[in-house]
Amino acid sequence: MPSTTGPAPWRDAVLAVVGLFLPVSCLGCGARDRAVCPACRADLARRPRRVRLVAGVRLDAAFEYEGLVRTLLLELKLRGRVDVAALLGRPTAELVRRALAASPPGTVVVRVPPSPRGRRRRGFDTVVLLLARGGVRGTRPLRRGRGDADGQKERTAVERVAATVGTLSASRFAGRDVVVVDDVVTTGVTMAEAIRAVRAAGGRVTRCVATASVDS
Ligand SMILES: [Zn+2]
């Protein structure tokens, strides 16, 4: 993984030179350009933020989970395409900063940890990488307890909720205000479990942030 984080103008120059020798196709439109061409970048920047409620808490998402955003997240998570992380991570980090600005002083940022399988496969924590690209560091992971969210697809909605309760835990949040961050929120079951875990540890979740959310 490159050690650079956040905006780095020289990376654009390096990528442009590399592109001369190793032309790649834009993941959005297929144009022979870098991973995401300028037109598709502009399209991403114009997309509206998403807001929904999870367990009574406001969730701000940088994007709707569809189209190019879904493609980029899958490329990042399944194929290790860390070169697309900044495009998604900067707007996510901006939402974390806004969530902190709207929360009491001393609010801490915690993240939903990757599943053990996802972490092994990727070798990095997607949320940590995304936030680092936007200049946000020092988040604390919730702990994974019994069970695992892997294999949720084969379950019914009720089974998913039942299987997820108790999979995350937290400690030392008594009296603390907390912002919870995850990369993708689909059903909201995992985010609701994160909120439950913080509350069970005595904390108060002021807001949730995600890179992408499925519109409900
Ligand atoms: Zn494009």
Image (cartoon, rainbow, N blue to C red):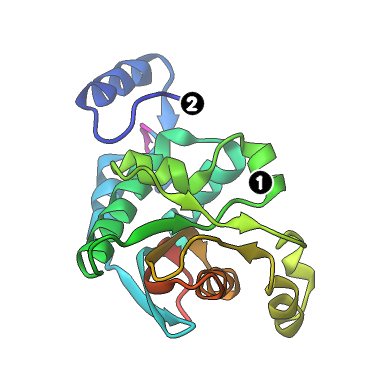
**Dominant SS type (magenta):** loop
Task: Measuring from the top left, give residue 61's x and y in whole percent.
Answer: 37, 66
Queried whether the magenta region covers residue 128, the answer comes back as no
Count of numbered circles in the view: 2
Residue positioned 45% across, 44% down in the render: 128
Q: Is residue 110 left or right of residue 134?
A: right
Residue situated in front as seen by the camera: 189 or 199? 199
Q: Is residue 214 above or below residue 84?
A: below
Q: Which residue is mark 1?
A: 118
Element marked by disc 2: loop
Element marked by disc 1: helix
Residue density around tag 2, few if under 14, some if 14–19, many if 20 or more, within 10 Å: few
Q: Is residue 71 left or right of residue 136?
A: right
Residue positioned 48% across, 26% down in the render: 1
Residue 164's quadrant in the figure?
bottom right
Task: Measuring from the top left, give residue 86's x and y in whole percent.
Answer: 34, 41
Which region shows up in magenta? 29-34
Residue situated in front as seen by the camera: 172 or 149? 172
Q: Is residue 119 left or right of residue 199?
A: right
Task: Measuring from the top left, give residue 108's x and y in whole percent.
Answer: 36, 58
Q: Which residue is mark 2?
A: 1
Which comes before the other along the chain, label 2 or label 1? 2
Residue density around tag 1, few if under 14, some if 14–19, many if 20 or more, within 10 Å: some
Q: Is residue 105 above or below residue 85?
A: below
**Could one spot residue 24 in this view of the protein?**
yes
Q: Is residue 22 above or below residue 151?
A: above
**Could one spot residue 30 in this view of the protein?**
no
Residue positioned 46% across, 35% down in the render: 82
